[in-house]
Image (spheres, helix red, strand yellow):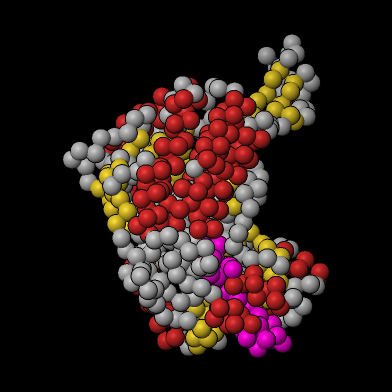
Amino acid sequence: MTVEKTKQIVMDGLGLKERNSGVYYGQWMGSEGKKTIESFCPINGSFLGSVTQGEESDYEKVIIAAQKAFKVWSVIPAPRRGEIIGEIGAELLKNKELLGKLVSLEVGKTISEGAGEIQEAIDIANFAVGLSRQLYGLTIASERPDHRLMEQWHPLGTIGVITSFNFPAAVWAWNALIAAVVGNVTIWKPSSSALLTAVAVSRIANRVMERNGLPPIFLLVCGSGRTVGNLLVNDKRVSLISFTGSTKVGRSVGEQTAARFGKSILELGGNNCAVVTSKAQIDLAVKGVAFGAMATAGQRCTSTRRVLVHSSIYPEFIAKLTEVYSKVNIGSPLDSSVIVGPLVNNGAVEDFKKTVTEAKEQGGRILFGGKTITIPQNENGCFVQPTIIEVPKQKGIVLEETFAPILYLMKFDSMDEAISIHNGVPQGLSSAIFSTDMREIELFISSLGSDCGIVNVNTSTAGAEIGGAFGGEKETGGGRESGSDSWKYYARRQTVTINYGYDIPLSQGIVFPV
């Protein structure tokens, strides 16, 4: 199906227009006299639609609505909150096909990945339903007689969520749906490269709130980072900022939020590495590395960007990996046979070209790819070749993250050497080892092994499940989102002491003779 035909079906099905409001605070802001951000399809460069930007006065309306909604939402019993989130998941499921195709149109994900993006949001909703009955606190043994010591968790209030283009719905769901079950209200500032997806998802979520007679807890403010982003980050009324994006911007977000004693979750850059040992099943490793490097055209924060291969299997691994790359179908992501779609925009293409040039200047040897390509009937698309570059040493551009399908290939001779190279970058998000040797595996996942927040054994660095906590260390930011007990980031811990006796005994043996 052509881009134009798919666009018509998707826009009509989701109720999107050529011009859409980008601010929701219980009602959609009027668009008259407002500046807009236009969305273009990276498949062929065609215009998809525009979204109006919020200004400071619009932002203030959103904040006031959030504070009012919190007073109602936070006192609703958590299991009931979970039921509402479950309804949102059901609505997303009804619209999964249309929303998935919108993701493909707007950011270039393949049809399979676009659908998977929405399924991830649905999975988070289902997870949140169960979580609503498991927001546990501890009861702690007290050293004082007739005393009970316990912990409980309260919602923070208003949460700010700033998302990137590469997961335009799922990362919002990680934050907003989990935060909502805890009792919070969310203000979403989406990437300017994925505004239509944000508008569509927000409409679906808020329709559920409206039909249940509940206040707006999923608020939306589209606009630039310099205006809306700065307002959100520096607002003391926003208890926590969850930011997904570059390390450079994330550092600034973290500093500004900390300066006002706010909390932050930072999901920043990843320079993820796969280690392929001499004991690896080579075909399995090739598949895992290829998926990690080429999925979403290398535009995942968990994309495999470096691969370390034991020298004894190096020639065989290269031969098999380049063979896989040579057979990959690159083209319109609306074609189900396509594995690699376009980069998100022309700026990303320029970054790809610049990085390939720098890698060559720094001694890298291109084993495959390295060029931009033109796809028939989609001549204005943002397509590049998945690229493998052999580098003699880890330095320069190899230490940086480029959001493109560029894979750096290096040799190693011992596990100690591999771990040293693996950990020798500023980022620490996802990692992988391919081996059938228990000792190699246990070393890699030990405290002396991978320094990343996520470690994978015999599977790709990309493709994390929602059930585990997602996040990394070092310049990746240190935050955690999604599953496990990540819900605690959206809550404040309160230690409670209850004296049910008739005296006031003191701890640590202190005596107060009054």
Above or below residue 141? Residue 400 is below
Q: Is residue 9 left or right of residue 288?
A: left
Residue 50: x and y in percent read 29, 49
Magenta segment range? 291-319
Image quadrant in which the C terminus is located: top right
**Residue 380 visible from this viewpoint:** yes
- List the single residue furthest toward the right: 438
Query: Which residue does the image show at 46% across and 48% down from the upper left?
Result: 98
Quadrant in which the N terminus is drawn: bottom left
In the image, 10: left or right of 325?
left
Could you say which quadrant of the image residue 360 lies in? bottom left
User: What residue is shown at x 60% (from left), y 76% (from top)?
Assistant: 307
Magenta stretch containing residue 338, yes or no?
Answer: no
Please state if 330 lies on the left or on the right of 62 as rendered: right
Residue at the extreme left: 33
Task: Determine whether, in the image, residue 432 is placed left or right of residue 112.
Answer: right
Vertical position of residue 307 compared to residue 38: above or below:
below
Return the residue nearer the eye: 404 or 358. 404
Above/below status of 266 relative to 81: below
> Percent from the top left, x then y, of residue 222?
34, 44
Number of numbered discs present? 0
Give the residue displayed 38% in from the left and 64% down from the top: 43
Question: Which image quadrant is residue 409 in?
Answer: bottom right
Q: Is residue 305 magenta?
A: yes
Q: Nearer the viewer, residue 197 or 459?
A: 197
Give the camera-side residue of 363 and 290. 290
Residue 490, quarter of the rendered image: top right
Residue 158 shows in the view: no
- Residue at screen point 59% across, 25% down: 80
The image shows residue 11 at horizontal and vertical percentages of 37, 47
Percent x, y of residue 155: 54, 31
